[in-house]
């Protein structure tokens, strides 16, 4: 089941969406342009009510929650040439939108076995989008020697528990748990049942 969708939209001058309400959380990341976001804080009532106005400008981010629980997070990340994530997996989906650069994604699509195994290699590049399913071990490596890699990362079910591997053949039970991860330490919330 996919928990996250990513849409890249271009909006013509003067165009606007109809007034609407969703049963899912929305996060808007504005890459360029300006405008206004109208958000009704009490949309759970019979009618939306008076909306609040938020100015939209390049590099701004807006969150339209369904309820008090945050269901997604969006990160902006930059990897210098040669840098990489550790080999890892987590109990949430991850969607990447590459804004700048080219690189390599390594991912194993067989999380049901006892260790990650031999990864598949995928080239990623500017304007590409890729999806990493729940618990699939993966690594992003900026293999481009001349350019930074910049991308947006959208995750479901924050805060996430990350399991780190020294290599692709380390057993799942020997992976090192990293929780909370450094950017979640200041926003830790009590969690329900662990899904891993």
Image (cartoon, rainbow, N blue to C red):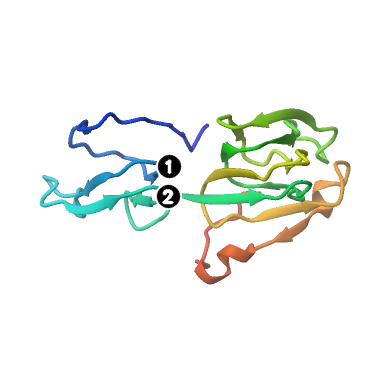
Residue at 73 percent across and 53 percent down: it is 163
Please report contact status of discs 1 and 2: CB closer than 8 Å, yes or no: yes
Place of residue 119 in the rendered image (x, y in percent of width and height, measured from the top left): 80, 33
In the image, what residue occupies the spot 63% across and 65% down? Answer: 182
Disc 1: which residue: 31
Q: Residue furthest front?
A: 146
Q: Which class describes the residues within 10 Å of circle 1: few (<14), some (14-19), or many (20+)?
A: some
> In the image, is 85 to the left or to the right of 58?
right
Q: Nearer the viewer, residue 171 or 186?
A: 186
Vertical side of 188 occupied by 65: above or below = above
Q: Which x, y percent locates residue 83?
A: 76, 50
- The earlier-in-sequence mark between 1 and 2 is 1
Secondary structure state at the residue bearing disc 2: loop
Given residues 132 and 173, the one toward you in this image is 132
Secondary structure under tag 1 reads loop
Decide: is 130 above or below 48: above
What residue is shown at x 74% (from left), y 35% (from top)? 104
The numbered dot on residue 59 is 2
Q: Position of residue 190 (x, y in %)?
A: 51, 66
């Amino acid at each position: 089941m996919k928990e996250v969708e990513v849409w890249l939209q271009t909006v013509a001058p003067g165009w606007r969406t109809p007034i609407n309400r969703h049963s899912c959380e929305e996060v808007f990341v504005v890459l360029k342009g300006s405008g206004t976001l109208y958000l009704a804080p009490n949309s759970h009532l019979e009618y939306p009510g008076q909306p609040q106005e938020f100015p939209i400008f390049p590099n701004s981010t807006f969150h339209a929650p369904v309820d008090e629980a945050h269901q997604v997070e969006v990160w902006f990340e930059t990897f210098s040439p040669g840098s990489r994530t550790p080999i890892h997996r987590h109990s949430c989906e991850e969607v990447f939108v590459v804004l700048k650069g080219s690189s390599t994604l390594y991912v194993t699509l067989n999380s049901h076995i006892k260790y990650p195994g031999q990864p598949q290699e995928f080239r990623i590049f500017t304007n590409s989008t890729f999806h990493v399913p729940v618990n699939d071990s993966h690594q992003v490596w900026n293999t481009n020697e001349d350019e930074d890699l910049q991308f947006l990362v959208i995750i479901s079910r924050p805060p996430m528990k990350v399991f780190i591997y020294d290599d692709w053949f380390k057993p799942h039970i020997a992976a090192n748990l990293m929780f909370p991860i450094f950017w979640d330490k200041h926003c830790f919330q009590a969690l329900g049942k662990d899904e891993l």
